[in-house]
Image (cartoon, rainbow, N blue to C red):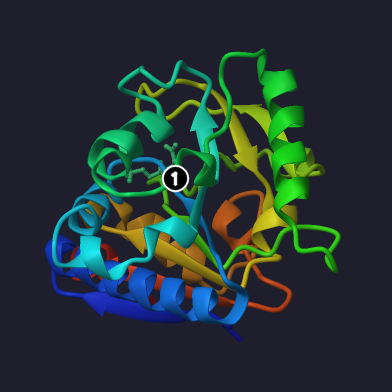
Amino acid sequence: MLKSKIHISQNGELLAKSFTEHFVSLANDAISKRGRFLAVLSGGGTPLMAYRLLSKPPLLEVVPWGQVHLFWGDERHVPHEDPQSNFGQAREALLDHVNIPDENIHSIPTDPSPGEAALAYAQTLRSIAEANQSSVRFDLVMLGLGSDGHTASLFPGQSALWKDPIIVTEGSYQGRPATRLTMTPLVFNQARKIIFLVSGEAKADALANALGETRDVDRFPSQAIDPTNGKVLWMVDSAAAKMIP
Ligand code: 6PG
């Protein structure tokens, strides 16, 4: 029995708008309850429209950016200035336009070697956990879905590697940088809310598999996202939803 909820928008624009509404409401709720909003952003092209909406009025003014802390679920091991950097893309579409303090932006470092960067980011995650918790509970984790079924940088056939909170991995996908750092389900599954954002017909097959009855995390990595005490929402557009069982 599927624990996730699915929200279908008519097109990519409405999907982005709907995502931003969730972002604002989750941010305000977390800040009123715990004084801060801990959000994990995703890479890829799909979230960029939502980032741009958040970076402009009216949304720009309704998010209390001073209490928002941003993290990345995965990163390509390229300099942050590289156009393929997930952080770099978010900086251009969102961070450069909002009043978020620098110390609230927790990008995955890519200057050190991948192994050193993974250790450093694991330490960042430990340092942000609440005093009474052994590991961080994110208020929101945003994830994408590749047409090959990967999410973050959790690629098919690699589930045996997901043993530490942050790992280095290699993933070949659409010519994008292959050496990656990624959070694993050990971190994602502690989150309070996980939102997958999926747009376009090219994702229809992967989405149907992700939500289908055949459960196999090695073939369909997004199925490993199963929060212990949180909720999953799939926000998709009608083109991506075409083949949902
Ligand atoms: C990345 C990602 C990745 C992404 C999917 C979908 O760094 O590439 O975080 O998991 O979300 O590949 O990418 P698109 O949105 O570009 O289709």
**Lateral position of residue 101 relative to residue 109, left or right:** left
In the rendered image of this protein, does residue 11 appear above or below residue 73? below
Describe residue 11's horizontal placement relative to residue 227 as left or right. left
Residue 232 point in image, percent of width and height: 53, 74
Rendered position, 242 above or below 201: below
Pointer 1 residue Cβ closer than 8 Å to ligand 1: no
Residue 171, quarter of picture: top right
Ligand 1, seen in the image, is in the quarter at top left
Q: Position of residue 174 (x, y in %)?
A: 35, 28
Identified at 23% across, 44% down, the residue is 97
Mark 1 lies on residue: 101
* Numbered disc total: 1
Which quadrant is the C terminus positioned in? bottom left
The residue drawn where x is 28% and y is 42% is 45
Q: At which x and y percent is residue 166?
A: 71, 39
What kind of residue is marked 1?
Pro
Is residue 220 in view?
Answer: no
Element under disc 1: loop
Give the position of the N terminus as an image quadrant.
bottom right
Q: Is residue 116 visible?
A: yes
Whether residue 245 is situated above or below residue 142 in the rendered picture: below
Q: Which of the 4 image quarters holds residue 224? A: bottom right
Q: Is residue 19 left or right of residue 110?
A: left
Give the class, few, some or many, for how many residues have Cα within 10 Å of label 1's Cα (few <14, many ≥20): few
The structure residue drawn at horizontal position 59% and vertical position 52%, both measured from the top left corner, is 221
**Between 206 and 229, which is closer to the camera in this rendering?**
229
Residue 17 image point, x, y percent? 20, 68
